[in-house]
Amino acid sequence: MSKQIVAFGASNSQHSINKQLATYAAHEVPNAEVVILDLNDYEMPIYSIDREKATGIPQLAHDFKSQLRAAGGIIISFAEHNGAYATAFKNIFDWISRIEKDVWYNKPMFLLATSPGARGGQTVLEIAHNKFKFMNTNTIATFSLPAFSRNFSPESGILDAALQMAFQDQLGQFVASL
């Protein structure tokens, strides 16, 4: 029986390396039905309590949340913008957190990050993990891929053997919790 995996890059870049990594990770889950989300399909006004009171929660927030509800597991790869979440992700996160308290439905999660640089988005990955572990008591595996263009190929995946082994270890933890 296959599990539905919802995956997305937490970026609105049309050429997001984080979307590439999230897509790769989702397709590495055995027997998974993979659903790849694009944050550009969920663009909403910037969250504010005043806007919520005036017009309610946008339908796109409900649509995004329903994708999470249907998932057996969630994979997110975070773009790091000035050491934190990309605004596109943060805005969606703010809106969906207003729908109901349980944002992630206690689903197993695999949190990733990558960047062109040597740290591979580790700062935003730590921020996300430290936040989400208080919102989700299920397994939250993590992996950072440094120097994306040197260590990743769309055809072959993760190229560095040590990084591939670390990725497989975390992927295994995620898969075991599905």
Image (cartoon, rainbow, N blue to C red):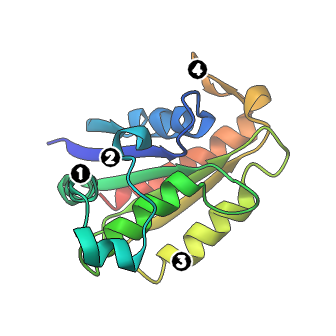
Give the quadrant of residue 107: bottom left
> Which of the two discs, 1 and 3, labels the residue nearer the N terminus?
1
Regarding mark 1 in the picture, which secondary structure is present there?
helix
> Which of the two discs, 2 and 1, labels the residue nearer the N terminus?
2
Q: Within 10 Å of the Cα at label 4, are there few (<14), some (14-19), or many (20+) other Cα atoms? A: few
- Residue 79 visible, this orientation: yes
Regarding mark 4 in the picture, which secondary structure is present there?
loop
Q: Within 10 Å of the Cα at label 1, are there few (<14), some (14-19), or many (20+) other Cα atoms? A: some
Q: Are marks 2 and 1 in contact (CB under 8 Å)?
A: yes
- Tell me if 141 is positioned left or right of 162 in this view: left
Q: Which disc, if any, is residue 154? A: 4
Q: Amino acid at mark 4?
A: Pro
User: In terms of depth relative to the viewer, which is nearer, 12 or 121?
Assistant: 12
> Which of the two discs, 2 and 4, labels the residue nearer the N terminus?
2
Q: Amino acid at mark 3?
A: Lys
Q: Tell me how far mark 1 sits from mark 3, CA to CA.
A: 21 Å
Residue denoted by label 2? 6
Marks counted in the figure total: 4
Q: Tell me how far mark 3 sits from mark 2, CA to CA.
A: 20 Å
> Which of the two discs, 3 and 2, labels the residue nearer the N terminus?
2
Residue denoted by label 3? 131
Q: Residue at x 60, y 54 (%)?
A: 86
